[in-house]
Image: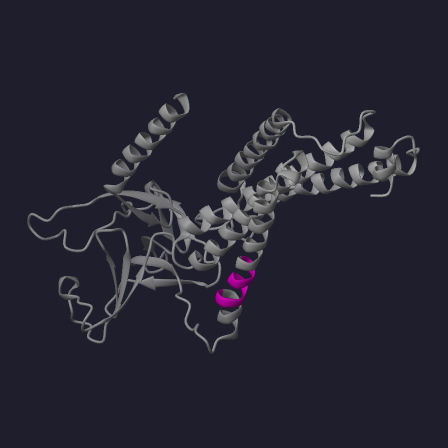
Amino acid sequence: LLIIFKTMLVLLLLIFLENSYSREVFVQKCCEDYEIMVDNKCTFTNETNQESWTPVFQGVRQVGAHVPKYRLVTGIPVCVMTQQWPIYHNSTDRLVMLADGTLRHYTLQEADISDEDLSDENNLSNDYKQGFYCRDKKVDSRSGQVLDVAIVCVPKVGGGWHDADWRMRKLLDPTLHFICIVAYLTVSIVHFVLPQLRDMVGNIMTTVCICLAVSQAADIVSIFTELHSPMSFITADIVMFVSLLAAFLWLSSLGFYIWKTFRSRNVFLRITDGRKYCYYSYGVWSLTIVISIIAIFAHFILDIPATKAASEPSAQGTAIGWLGIAMFFLPIGFTILLNTYFCLSTLQIMSNMASCGRIHHKLKYL
């Protein structure tokens, strides 16, 4: 009952947060709220004669039009597979903010068309979702000209059956991931169903296979969302690294269990203690959560690209940065070293083991 009550509270909290945030529109600004761009550098607004940039949505200039509630998200988008490109609002290029926070870029053939008369039927347009663009006010220090600029991730052109890179990324890679998922799930189901394998080692193997299957599934999601949904992309990356970290920690727990079993005097080939598995679960999952929180904190707060100057706009990544990856894989490296020690120590124990019983005799020649 307590678990059901906590689950209901979490669901109600998620529904409340979804309803509250669904009314807000997220608009990405290149510099901070109190800054504008001066010669491609973020400068405090009070050091210039200009005001900070505020978004103007399409159609809000009309009388009685509803102004959507928005929230500014600062930072230049990090284009993983494409390059950044600046677009200036002028006579041939028009930048329009839609009511859902999407930036629409119109390429005009006639320069005398007003912003209110823009239409998708007569003009070429391309939409950029939040995470693939940023807008701000730019001042040219030489001429004093004030410009409305947008830095966007150039849409990737190409793809299809005739593109070898597309076939490798969108067909072959997901297919191999799917085969791995089927193999992991098969091993986990066999260890979970057969009573002969449902012991301590079998439970750990089942957990490891499930973690690896989740990691492969998250990698598949990141393949298809890297250029479409930045939030889904980074969420899939986080799930993939957390699952991979959990799998290696469980492998370390398996190595520790086998090492401890061989060092004990009462050696049993089969241990079916469910309480011991619960103790191992508490330790492994607690350590996984702590390391994951530290790695995510390092990515969002401490990870700063080395190629960015201090005076340039801060960038918010759409995937785990190098510092976050290092925080995830450093414990994995320690687990590999620890498992190496467990393996060598166990082999030494087995080589020195005397044939003083049937069980020891079997363990010696495993």
Q: Is residue 133 above or below residue 124?
A: above
Q: Is residue 260 above or below residue 140?
A: above
Is residue 325 visible in the rendered image? The answer is: no
Q: Is residue 173 magenta?
A: yes
Is residue 142 visible in the rendered image? The answer is: yes
Q: Quadrant of residue 350?
A: top right
Give residue 316's position: percent from left, percent from top.
Answer: 44, 47
Q: Quadrant of residue 69?
A: top left
**Would residue 197 be found to the left or right of residue 9 on screen?**
right
Q: Is residue 247 magenta?
A: no
Give residue 104's position: percent from left, percent from top.
Answer: 27, 61
Along the line of sight, the residue nearer the viewer: 332 or 62: 332
Q: Is residue 246 above or below residue 263?
A: below
Write the start and end of the magenta stretch as one range.
170-177
Q: Residue at x 86, y 34 (%)?
A: 358
Give residue 291's position: percent from left, percent from top.
Answer: 58, 35
